[in-house]
Image (cartoon, rainbow, N blue to C red):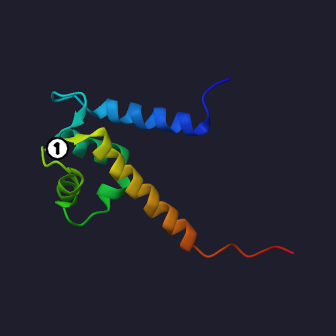
Amino acid sequence: MGPTETERCIESLLAVFQRYAGKEGDSKTLSKKEFKTFMDTELGSFTKNQKDPGVVDRMMKKLDMNNDGQLDFSEFLNLIGGLAQACHEHMASAPAPPKRH
């Protein structure tokens, strides 16, 4: 039996993190430049719609809990969790489609 849907999602998150981490050194963390590349590539619709060019830098600073200038996988997951929560709240607040009789 293959991996479950949840296991595949976890594998995907790990693969995405690894794709961007380590291009500038430590493969266990995202540098500021790697994080910006991740945001522009994977979440481009978010970054392209920002009027404030410093939003990605502020996000990095907020996510970097230990203030080492890098995002480890745990810090990266805070971003993913926050985005998932925002999407969930948006979907939950959307009006229900009309019922068909």
Q: Quadrant of residue 45?
A: bottom left
Image location (x, y in percent) of residue 75: 28, 46
Residue lying farthest left? Answer: 68
Residue drawn at (13%, 44%) of the image = 69
Residue nearest the observer in this picture, 44 or 26: 26
Image location (x, y in percent) of residue 98: 73, 76
In the picture, the quarter occupied by the C terminus is: bottom right
Horizontal placement of 9 versus 1: left or right? left
Q: Quadrant of residue 3?
A: top right
Residue drawn at (69%, 72%) of the image = 97
Horizontal placement of 48 versus 9: left or right? left
Image location (x, y in percent) of residue 96: 66, 74
What residue is pinned by disc 1?
32
Helix or strand or loop: what does disc 1 sit on? helix
**Number of numbered tags placed on the structure image:** 1
**Crowd rating for badge 1 (residues with CA inside 10 Å; few <14, some 14–19, many 20+):** some
In the picture, the quarter occupied by the N terminus is: top right
Residue nearest the observer in this picture, 37 or 78: 78
Residue drawn at (20%, 65%) of the image = 52
Image location (x, y in percent) of residue 54: 16, 60
Name the kind of residue labelled 1 in the image.
Answer: Lys
Residue lying farthest top? Answer: 1
Residue lying farthest right? Answer: 101
Q: Is residue 49 above or below residue 94?
A: above
Residue drawn at (50%, 68%) of the image = 90
Residue nearest the observer in this picture, 82 or 20: 82
